[in-house]
Image: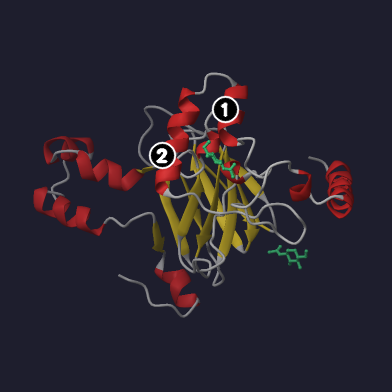
């Protein structure tokens, strides 16, 4: 939406909410829906049971109109609760270290029938969102606070290790970047301050593969060692040690950054 349009929309919404609060225009009782001072309902998280049942009902609704009947039943007080999502609960402080909260069909069943998912991510000082890929979605990630270096590897087949080109960008002050579907990518916070990003996906179920975890966890050693060039220093015992060390999605990276920020690393 462009700025003029959104300005006009805000003016319209302000005018209508002052003239006639949305809740009072609803015919049915809104007893089960809480409303804010401005008159529109406020968000209530869905339970896991509600998410599961909404998923089932939406998948059984054939047409878009049928889906609307499921999402916004006539007695719901005019609420958009079934297509809303709070990434970080007001009751808790936002995460300080690495974590990403994903709004996809697992958490927002109302996305069923769309090609949209979203995420809010927190990457602590010197933190790394380790190399991963989204098998079913392109991602556009925008930094809303702090600084991140974002990078992905280009699609190049049959090249020698070390020769696959990577493209990268320093992202700060609301700068965003595309991470194409299926491409291995990472984000690193090179500063001593936390970074926060907002990401959009063109799939409601984008998924995530951790590259190192996936590669090293499922394959038998007989397959792994030849695909790594049969190194003499990487026998079954070393591979087992390596597997134990492979971190989850976020790590505090690079001694140099941690030292500069006065942090102790976990290594
Ligand atoms: C969300 O969807 C469920 C299932 O149709 C419905 O029972 C519930 O009233 C809806 N909630 C709101 C706030 O519209
Ligand atoms: C971000 O923008 C602000 C002003 O809008 C500026 O003061 C600051 O230096 C910028 N930060 C970076 C890292 O460019």
Q: Residue at x 88, y 46 (%)?
A: 12
Rendered-image quarter of ligand 1: top right
Residue 262 versus residue 14: which sits nearer the camera? 14
Judging depth in this view, the residue of 60 and 228 nearest the camera is 60
Query: Sequence-wise, which precedes: disc 2 or disc 1?
Result: 2
Circle 2 packing at 10 Å, graded few (<14), some (14-19), many (20+), is: some
The residue under the point 60% across, 35% down is: 73
In the image, residue 112 lies at what x, y percent? 52, 31
Up-down: is 31 above or below 75?
below
Left or right of 147 on screen, residue 223: left
Q: Badge 1 local density, few (<14 within 10 Å), some, or many (20+)?
A: many
Residue 26 location (% of width, % of height): 74, 43
Q: Examine the image and state in which quarter residue 263 appears.
A: bottom left
Q: Is residue 34 left or right of residue 238?
A: right
For label 2, the residue is 52
Q: Position of residue 206 (x, y in %)?
A: 47, 36
Residue corresponding to mark 1: 67
Residue shown at the point (85%, 50%) measured from the top left: 20
Q: Secondary structure at mark 2?
A: helix
Corner quadrant of residue 51: top left
Would the CB of label 2 be found within 8 Å of ligand 1? no
Q: Secondary structure at mark 1?
A: helix
The quadrant the C terminus occupies is bottom left
Regarding residue 207, the answer to whether it shows in the image is no
Q: Name the foreground residue: 45 vs 235.
A: 45
Residue 248 shows in the view? yes
**Vertical comparison of 178 with 88: above or below:** above
Furthest residue in direction bottom, as rendered: 262
Give the side of residue 1 with respect to residue 194, left or right.
Answer: right
């Amino acid at each position: 939406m462009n700025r003029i349009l959104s300005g006009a929309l805000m003016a319209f919404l302000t005018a209508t909410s002052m003239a006639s609060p949305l809740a009072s225009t609803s015919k049915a009782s809104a007893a089960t829906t809480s409303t804010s001072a401005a008159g529109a309902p406020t968000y209530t998280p869905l339970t896991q049971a509600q998410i599961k049942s909404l998923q089932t009902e939406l998948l059984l609704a054939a047409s878009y109109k049928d889906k609307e009947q499921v999402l916004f039943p006539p007695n719901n007080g005019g609420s958009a609760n079934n297509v809303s999502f709070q990434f970080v609960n007001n009751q808790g402080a936002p995460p300080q270290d690495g974590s990403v909260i994903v709004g996809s069909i697992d958490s927002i069943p109302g996305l069923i029938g769309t090609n949209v998912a979203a995420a809010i991510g927190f990457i602590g000082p010197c933190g790394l969102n380790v190399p991963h890929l989204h098998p079913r979605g392109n991602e556009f990630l925008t930094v809303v606070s702090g600084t991140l270096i974002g990078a992905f590897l280009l699609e190049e087949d049959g090249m020698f290790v070390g020769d696959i080109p990577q493209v990268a960008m320093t992202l700060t002050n609301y700068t965003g970047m595309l991470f194409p579907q299926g491409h291995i990518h990472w984000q690193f916070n090179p500063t001593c301050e936390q970074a926060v990003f907002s990401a959009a996906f063109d799939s409601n179920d984008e998924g995530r593969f951790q590259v190192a975890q996936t590669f090293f966890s499922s394959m038998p050693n007989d397959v792994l060692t030849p695909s790594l060039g049969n190194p003499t220093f990487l026998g079954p015992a070393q591979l087992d040690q390596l597997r134990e060390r492979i971190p989850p999605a976020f790590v505090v990276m690079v001694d140099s950054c941690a030292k500069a920020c006065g942090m102790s690393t976990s290594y």
